Image (cartoon, rainbow, N blue to C red):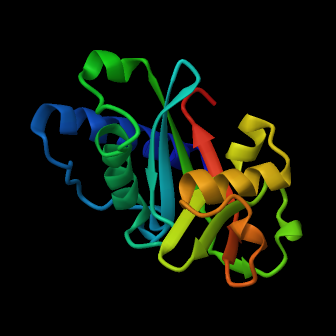
């Protein structure tokens, strides 16, 4: 995507949160006149406060046009991430940095050693349990592959730490186009 599309989406995310703070409903806008923003895309919106995670919500599958998905995920990251209290007011929002990750289509792999840390995001699934890490999690934590996958299984999916080694565990990889405010 072009830098002006990144800027548009980041502004849209911020304005969506601001609108929700004021109206307690999701912002509805006319479809933008840009074919890239109208494509159904999987997307995550991450909020950071002083360099620390403040909220992150996304969809692994493309369900909505990109511009609508950004609105929905921005509101979700600010008000629906159960790990954090909701954003309280516009003053707090001013101190939050927004990051958007647009996901490529998923690809199933059968050998976890093919995962490229810092490049591939991973979605792991076993039975009714699943968990996901964006590619930047490996970079930000400094984890090696086993630690990355072990934490994904145990902390995100609620599976045993080494469940990624089981033959009946499904592993999917994807890449992201990531951009954030201030870039």
Where, quadrant-wise, is the N terminus in this rendering? bottom right
Q: Residue furthest front?
A: 160
Percent of width and height locating residue 84: 38, 34
Is 121 left or right of 54, judged from the image as shown?
right
Q: Residue 8: which quarter of the image? A: top left
Tell me which residue sits at (49%, 41%) in the image.
Answer: 46
Q: Nearer the viewer, residue 108 or 24?
A: 108
Tell me which residue sits at (46%, 40%) in the image.
Answer: 10
Percent of width and height locating residue 63: 40, 73
Where, quadrant-wise, is the C terminus in this rendering? top right
* Residue 173 appears in the figure: yes
Q: Nearer the viewer, residue 33 or 18?
A: 18
Percent of width and height locating residue 44: 50, 53
Q: Residue furthest right?
A: 113
Tell me which residue sits at (82%, 64%) in the image.
Answer: 115
- Image mark count: 0
Q: Residue 173: which quarter of the image? A: bottom right
* Residue 118 appears in the figure: no
Q: Nearer the viewer, residue 179 or 84?
A: 84
Is 145 left or right of 96, judged from the image as shown?
right
Tell me which residue sits at (20%, 49%) in the image.
Answer: 26
Is 13 left or right of 132, judged from the image as shown?
left
């Amino acid at each position: 995507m072009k830098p002006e599309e990144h800027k548009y989406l980041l502004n849209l995310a911020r304005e969506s949160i601001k609108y929700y703070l004021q109206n307690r409903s999701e912002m509805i806008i006319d479809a933008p006149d840009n074919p890239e923003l109208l494509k159904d895309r999987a997307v995550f919106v991450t909020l950071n406060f002083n360099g620390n995670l403040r909220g992150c919500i996304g969809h692994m599958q493309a369900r909505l046009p990109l511009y609508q998905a950004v609105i929905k995920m921005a509101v979700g990251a600010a008000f629906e991430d159960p790990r954090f209290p909701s954003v309280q007011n516009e003053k707090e929002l001013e101190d939050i940095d927004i990051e958007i990750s647009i996901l490529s289509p998923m690809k199933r792999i059968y050998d976890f050693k093919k995962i490229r840390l810092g490049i591939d995001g991973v979605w792991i699934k076993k039975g009714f349990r699943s968990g996901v890490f964006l590619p930047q999690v490996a970079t930000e934590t400094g984890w090696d592959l086993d630690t990355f996958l072990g934490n994904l299984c145990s902390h995100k999916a609620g599976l045993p730490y080494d469940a990624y080694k089981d033959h009946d565990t499904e592993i999917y990889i994807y890449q992201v186009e990531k951009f954030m405010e201030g870039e």
